[in-house]
Amino acid sequence: MGPATAMNLGRLLTQTARRLPDRLALVQGGRRLTWAELDARVDRFAAVLRAQGVGHGDRVLVHSRNTVAMFESLWAVLKVGAVWVPTNVRLTPAEVAYLGAASEAKAMLRDQGFAGHAEAVRAESPALRTVLAVGDAGPGEVDLEAAMAAAAPPPPDHEADVAYGDACWFFFTSGTTGRPKAAVLTHGQMSFVVANHLADLMPGLSERDCALICAPLSHAAGLHALATVARGCPSVMTASERFDPEEVWRLVEAHRATTMFVVPTMLTLLVDHPSVDRHDHTSLRHLMYAGAPMYRADQKRALAKLGGGCLTQYFGLGEVTANITVLRPDQHSLEDDPAFPLGSCGMPRTGMDVAILDEAGRRLAPGETGEICVRGPAVFAGYFENGAANAKAFAGGWFHTGDLGHLDARGFLYITGRASDMYISGGSNIYPREIEEAILTHPAIAEVAVVGLPHPKWGEAGVAAVVPKPGEAVDEAAIRDHLAGRIARYKQPLRIVFWDSLPKSGYGKVPKALVRQRLEAEGVGFAD
């Protein structure tokens, strides 16, 4: 019996273009494409890839801002049966060169202005044969638009045959604890994820909706695009290179956007920005937030500003394609009503199994803290050419997330934090998330991050990096007074520093590794 066949995910676009050829598909700035126009461009893009020798299983590195060309590249790569390898556009040339070499990319698409990144990839990647450039192609590069204009459109139903387990996307981990690893996502797995997103995150989505894309397509926003295209829901992409709350709210109102995805830091910026009150956002039905834990104080401000009818939280890693839990709009509560799962990131997604395991791989009872582990059809195929990492990640038949947490008696999941974020002070396990939640209830605090640093007496001790709200004055004594009675004394940070902002990754998260690096660079620590 041969390998199970699967639908080539690229056919989601093909099917929608046949069903809704003249309906709006994609908007960015002054560019507007119907489904028929978008599909025709993607087919020509696919023809360009094939002419460059790109086919089944070949990796295509994509270093680009959110653009029409990047959106099209996902579908063209899928249709030829190749593997989409998107990068974080804020990475340095050396970092992108590592991803190109690690993925053994055969071709690369680069956005305008990134010739230096392409040169770095060429120098490190012997497998690389072709660089497609947008707008400023140099010597040895292929001008994408010119090549697409010259390409003969392929015949109908040209999409490559694929098996269920064939790779379609290399989702690189953030690499906060070492070099990034390529998580292999497959056509079969992603078919399940698309169906699950539509069932659990965006029920009822159709061509009558409108999706606003303001997060990087290289990450979760790209996963959401698979689902919106499948339902014929048009997408509007922001044009600004940087996240601009004013632009987001303006586009929500102008296009009557019904669905969009953000990470929690972006949601906080949106609800705290004065433009939220100047634009009509009542069209939003599915405002999804994920990618990092959201503090209860921030969540309550969002609920107060937007109402509880549109906020959907979910939890998932790239390796599980964001598909572990969901907290529906009706499971959110502005009031601290104990009947609601307050502070939870939700219940297991349909078809997924979540367990809390101890270090020996045994299930823990409700309320007990251990590692969050998951199994089900959304789990990836493994890390590309990394047997040691796979053996550790899949120990005992579960995927080990590296996150700590507990389940309540009803099955709702509560995240304590990353296992790597926990520190041990005086023999006690300290979970930064608990301390951060308490500090954020102070009305003058906008952001906070707590990390453990080496201490000569206690082994490790906590340092809190605190960002006051604009125009607010707060000192260490005020924060310590605020924590008294909220957090046991042994859990309280020994040092508190004040910053104008927290260091963030290209996806808007606050990696604790970056916080530690900045503290060390500023000489903050505990002397021997």
Image (spheres, rainbow, N blue to C red):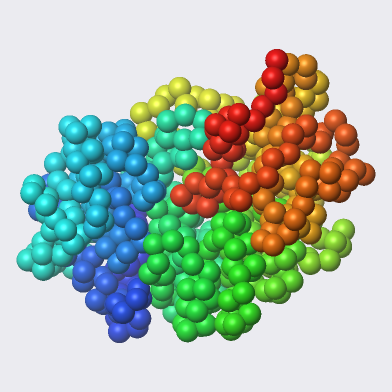
Residue 373 in the image, given as x and y percentages of width and height: 63, 37
Residue 460 in the image, given as x and y percentages of width and height: 72, 23
Left or right of 181, for residue 110 = left
Left or right of 446, for residue 87 = left
- At a point 47% along the width and 63% down the height, the residue shown is 243
- At a point 24% along the width and 76% down the height, the residue shown is 37
**Quadrant, the C terminus:** top right
Looking at the image, the residue that sits furthest to the right is 485
Residue 233 in the image, given as x and y percentages of width and height: 43, 75
Q: As displayed, is residue 176 above or below residue 162? A: above
Q: Quadrant of residue 423?
A: top right
Q: As displayed, is residue 72 above or below residue 49? A: below
**Can I make out residue 171 in this image?**
yes
- At a point 85% along the width and 61% down the height, the residue shown is 336
Front-most of residues 122 and 349: 122
Front-most of residues 318 and 498: 498
Left or right of 382, for residue 445 = right
Residue 279 in the image, given as x and y percentages of width and height: 57, 82
- At a point 46% along the width and 40% down the height, the residue shown is 173
Q: As displayed, is residue 285 above or below residue 117? A: below
Front-most of residues 484 and 120: 484
How many dots with numbers? 0
Q: Quadrant of residue 449?
A: top right
Q: Quadrant of residue 264?
A: bottom right
**Quadrant, the N terminus:** top left
**Can I make out residue 206 in this image?**
no
Left or right of 281, for residue 438 = right
